[in-house]
Every structure is written in C-alpha cells, then in structure tokens.
Amino acid sequence: MFELILHGTVTSAKGFLAGAVHAGIKSSDSTDLAILYSQSPCVAAAVFTTNKVKAAPVILSQEHLSTAQAQAIAANSGCANACTGQQGAADALEMANLAAQKLNLEPEDVLIASTGVIGTPLPMDCIKGGIEQIKLRQNGGHAFARAIMTTDTTPKEIGARVSFEGKSFSIGGALKGSGMIHPDLATMLCFISTDARVDAAFLQASLRKAADISFNMATIDGDTSTNDSVFLLANGMAGNRIINFDNGEAFQEALNEVCIRLAMAMVRDGEGANRLMEVTVDGATTQVEARRAARTVAGATLVKTALHGGNPNWGRIAAALGRSGVEMALDKLDIYVNNTLVMKQGSPVFCNQEEMRITLLTRDTAIARICLNLGDGKATAWGCDLSEEYVTLNSEDIT
C-alpha cells in the first residue's frame, strides 16, 4: 500500500538534502545549478537516452554507475554540454570533482546531469562558483526542481510513502521536460530518491520497468535528446528488510505510480501545449503490439493538431493506428473518445461533428480508448496537442 505525500519532492525520502543557486549559466536570474545529496551511500540505478549522440554528462554518469553506487548528483540547466568534444568530457569530470570536493566524496560517487542548448561549452567559472555557494537543506527539493527547468512552465515533483512489512519507506521525485519528448526517453532529466533498502539488481530492473510504462510511453514532438537521464538513488535509511525480486511488488507499484505521474505532468506541460491526450489500446495480440499502437497514435502529428484545434476528426486516430504496423481487423475495431463510442466494428457511430466538438474536445484532457478485440495486449501512452507556440519556441535557442 502507498499514499502520495502532500507537496512531496526529491527530498521527501529520509536522509536526502538538496540545494540550488543562480550560478549565471542562464542569462535570466533563475536558479540553474543544483545538488542532490544523500547522507548515506546509495545503491544507484539509471536509464539513459538511446540517442547515439550522447552528451558528456551521460557518458560520465554511465561510467560512474559501473559500481551501481552513488551518493550525490550535480545538475545544471542552461547548457547541455552536448557535442562539445574533449573539452565537454573534461568539464563534466571537473563538475563531478567540484561537487565531490564540496561533499567530501570521491568523484566516482557523484553523477552529473545537464540540460539546455546543445553545442555550447559549460561556463566552468560559473559552475565552480555556484557549487561553492549551494547550501543543502532537507526542504531543498523544491529549489532543486526549479533549478533544472528550461522551457518548463512549472516544476514537476512528487512523493509517495509505502507501507512494507510493518515499516514504511518513501519515494520522491523531481523531473524537468517540456520539449524534445518522445518514447525512449526525452529531453528530460528525472531524479528519484528512496530511503528503502533495495537490492542493486532489483533496483535497476525496477527502474527500467517503471520507465518503460511511463517515460517511454510519453511523446510531445517526436524528438529524443542527447541528455536524457533517469536516476534512482536508494540509501536504505528506512531500515526495512532488503527489497528484492521476491518481495518487491509494493516497491514496484509505488515506483510505477511516481514515474507515471511525473511523465503525465511532463506531457501536460509540453511546449505550447493546451491539452493532454491519453491513449489506451487494449485487445491487441500482445503487449508489444499494444505499446506500438498507443505510441503511434499519441505521437501522430495530425492527431495532435486536431486535438489542438478541437477538430473532432476521429478518423485521424484510426488512420494513425492503421499505419502503426500492428495486427488489426477493421471490422473488429472500436474507438472511444472520452468514454463515448465513435467507431464500432469499423463503422462510425458518433457523426455529428459539432456536437462531438462540444462534447468531447473542449476539455483539457482527451482520453482515447482503442479496442482491437484480438487478444489480451494492453498499453497506455500520453501525448499532447501541437500548437503554434511550439514552433515559435523552437525557432530560437532555448535555455
């Protein structure tokens, strides 16, 4: 059993501290450099971008995670430190060294995350001065969440408390992401902490499973980034019996919920977005087929533009499904929009376009359910509308 923590954040779990400053990486006066720190060493897990162009912080963090241990994460916004060559690699390492010196850790105990403009070197004078100024606090998670934002309009945070064998542990998270979002991660950085004692192999498997049903089912614009990272630190300070593959159901359930809620918050805050779309496909021949279908529909440009304009052309959903490559039979296909049946066995049911517009597409959330009626496969994906503001934002460099 788990419950959400009111105003939960990445420091909701016992023993985690965070802090942030305006180091001058961004031209604005907003915070842009932060540290998340555990008072005890952590078992660590992560998943990273599948893009073959990987930023220096991703490469360094992958190296540091070879031991599945870490105790701190230093993160900045305003500069991605991607496609910056040998200098970028050296700067990422120096950033880890600076944070390690501040925290009396080994550099290998520090993970690095950066987000912002690609192809710009990190301003290391700003990084050095900023790290020295950061003050770590138990309630510093909210500042941490704001410091990692780029085009986000709001911070994305969550906390959950889990009852487990007579004890309780917490999971907290903070995420940034608003554009360059597509399955197989996004231009997103996600930081998750827990005070649970967790076996390292199970922690990595659990995170990958949670990411697959959340972040890898979220799409805003069809682009993936060079810096995508999801980190999970477990310091064991809750004192529970170690969680592993035999008893990890409650942990997995709570982690799934944390990741799904963060993914939905990210898509809802998509660049220029006004509406969230949830696409559930059931009755597919396999779950793999269901995932492919849901992701295709949620990411279809014509579906997204119709959603933005309140265009009730549900045929675009059917067309996107048809090109997804999944097994289907038109005479078995049912489609629902906001619980209203619009297509039954391949034929239209709800044909009054203006009534549909008013009834179905004036809300800030559209829920599409696609029933293939062929098997037991089921999956859900999340997308948003595509607006003129998205084009405007992305016609300029974004920090």
Image (cartoon, rainbow, N blue to C red):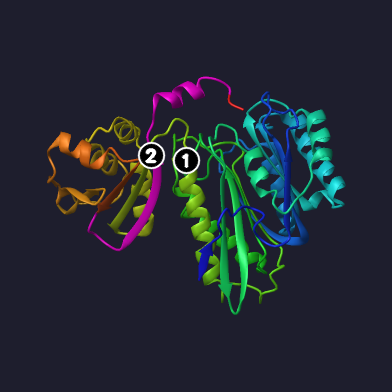
- Which numbered circle lies on residue 96? none
- Name the residue at 50% across, 45% down: 184
Q: Which numbered disc covers residue 182? A: 1
Image height of 199 relative to 275, above or below: below
Q: Give the total of numbered labels.
A: 2
Tell me which residue sits at (55%, 31%) in the image. 151
User: Mark 1 falls on what kind of element?
Assistant: loop
Q: Report the span colored magenta.
A: 372-397
Q: Position of residue 22 (x, y in %)?
A: 73, 33
- The spot of residue 28 in percent (x, y) is 66, 25
Relative to residue 270, is residue 333 depicted above or below? below
Left or right, residue 229 beside residue 286: right
Residues at badges 2 and 1 in contact (C-beta under 8 Å)? yes
Is residue 83 or residue 275 the one in the foreground?
Answer: 275
Q: Does the magenta portion include 395?
A: yes
Left or right, 290 with reference to 82: left
Q: Residues within 10 Å of mark 1 (few under 14, many from 20)?
A: many
Disc 1 marks a residue whose amino acid type is His
Residue at the location (66% across, 69% down)?
A: 199
Q: Position of residue 183 (x, y in %)?
A: 47, 44
Q: Is residue 267 left or right of residue 93?
A: left
Q: Is residue 236 above or below residue 367?
A: below
Q: Mark 2 sits on what residue? A: 299
* Mark with earlier residue (2, 1): 1
Where residue 244 appears, x then y in whole percent? 61, 72
Q: Residue at x 66, y 38 (%)?
A: 147
Indicate the secondary structure of the residue bearing disc 2: helix
The residue nearer to you, when weighing 367 against 61, is 367
Amino acid tagged 2: Gly
